[in-house]
């Protein structure tokens, strides 16, 4: 087992600094399951397998799964117009379907660019809809191009609520987290259930780590509001190999290259909440104080999950290097 090389790759997270939790799974077995550094600098709490991190955009695969579950139920269809479920959107959104939202091909304007500066408090998913209700322009005709869209995934959480009649955090808990025994995973709402073993986010400012755990957009759930642990994500990963949660057809949709990713410094295609590069399925997540990634090599039954409570570095290259240690080949292949 390449522990010396692993420790070298993870050295920057070790010690009295904002840390990381690392999971390497092969054939469902945890080859590496450990924490580095601190989840809470003020109290000196060490990061570990049970530490819960804000997943940021790694959350999108759960939003996509929620929509796919409702499609399996026959409650909605992937190609439903979004205005079927959110009729308050302007007529310019007539041609946008749920598929467009799932694949970042809707052309919706980024809600972050529509928020008041400086922002007063935190915006929620319903607030994203309120902003888009007043926006009578799109970046492009729906389906004609790719542009990564947090707006789209915020709207999808509202579609889940309208279609299911349940609050989005409740739907996730009842239909995904509980059935998979992901008991330390939740869509976090201020004033709701607390995050167990919560990691606090940090950013390095002038050579010192400062807590930067929340921003004006941190309360939006559909695009990035889930907290989870590497142990729970091991259970999630296991469920993606069979039909215990999502049917074969649903997983085929989620993992199929639906559109080419453009405008990024990596090559990928996009499914439903997943990027596809070569033989990997992956997604990263970045928000104030957190950087995360999950990379799966499904044909090799290998998965690397790296969750961190700091603003840098980007963990995706490190996860590829860790994967390469267990694949016996150069990273990125």
Image (cartoon, rainbow, N blue to C red):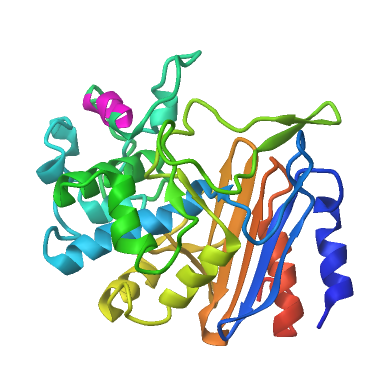
Which image quarter holds the N terminus?
A: bottom right
Q: Could you tell me how many numbered marks the image carries? A: 0
Q: Position of residue 65 (x, y in %)?
A: 33, 62
Q: Position of residue 46 (x, y in %)?
A: 76, 50
Q: Nearer the viewer, residue 141 or 169?
A: 169
Residue shown at the point (41%, 21%) measured from the top left:
115
Q: Is residue 214 left or right of residue 123?
A: right
Q: Is residue 287 left or right of residue 106?
A: right
Q: Is residue 246 left or right of residue 39?
A: left
Image quadrant in which you'd find residue 2: bottom right
Q: Is residue 275 left or right of residue 202?
A: left
Q: Position of residue 40 (x, y in %)?
A: 72, 40
Which image quarter holds the C terminus?
A: bottom right
From the image, give the main secondary structure of the stretch colored magenta: helix
Q: Can the viewer see residue 101 in this picture?
A: yes
Q: Can the viewer see residue 266 in this picture?
A: no
Q: Position of residue 233 (x, y in %)?
A: 52, 65
Image quadrant in which you'd find residue 162: top left
Image quadrant in which you'd find residue 251: bottom left
Residue shown at the point (57%, 86%) measured from the top left:
27
Judge whether 88 appears above or below 322 on screen. above
Residue 330 in magenta stretch: no
Residue shown at the point (60%, 48%) measured from the top left:
197
In the image, the segment drawn in magenta is 127-133
Residue shown at the point (33%, 50%) measured from the top left:
105
């Amino acid at each position: 087992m390449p522990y010396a090389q692993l420790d070298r790759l993870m050295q920057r997270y070790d010690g009295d600094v904002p840390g990381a939790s690392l999971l390497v799974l092969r054939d469902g077995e945890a080859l590496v399951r450990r924490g580095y550094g601190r989840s809470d600098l003020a109290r000196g709490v060490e990061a570990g397998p049970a530490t819960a991190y804000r997943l940021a955009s790694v959350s999108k695969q759960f939003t996509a799964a929620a929509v796919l579950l409702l499609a399996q139920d026959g409650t909605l269809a992937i190609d439903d117009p979004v205005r079927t479920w959110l009729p308050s959107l302007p007529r310019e959104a007539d041609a946008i379907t749920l598929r467009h939202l799932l694949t970042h091909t809707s052309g919706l304007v980024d809600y972050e660019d529509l928020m008041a500066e400086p922002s007063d408090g935190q915006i929620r998913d319903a607030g994203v809809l309120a902003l888009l209700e007043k926006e009578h322009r799109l970046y492009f005709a729906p389906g004609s191009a790719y542009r990564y869209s947090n707006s789209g995934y915020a709207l999808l959480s509202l579609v889940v609520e309208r279609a299911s009649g349940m609050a989005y955090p409740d739907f996730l808990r009842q239909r995904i987290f509980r059935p998979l025994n992901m008991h330390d995973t939740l869509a976090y709402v201020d004033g709701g259930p607390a995050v167990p073993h919560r990691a606090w986010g940090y950013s390095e400012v002038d050579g010192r780590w400062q807590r930067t755990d929340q921003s004006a957009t941190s309360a939006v759930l559909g695009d990035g509001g889930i907290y989870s642990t590497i142990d729970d994500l091991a259970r999630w990963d296991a469920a993606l190999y069979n039909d215990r949660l999502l049917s074969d057809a649903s997983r085929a949709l989620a993992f199929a290259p639906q559109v080419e990713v453009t405008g990024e410094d990596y090559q990928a295609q996009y499914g439903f909440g997943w990027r596809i590069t070569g033989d990997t399925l992956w997604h990263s997540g970045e928000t104030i104080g957190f950087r995360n990634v999950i990379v799966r090599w499904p044909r090799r039954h290998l998965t690397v999950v790296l969750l961190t409570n700091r603003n840098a570095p980007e963990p995706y290259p490190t996860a590829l290097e860790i994967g390469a240690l267990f694949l016996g080949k150069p990273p990125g292949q």
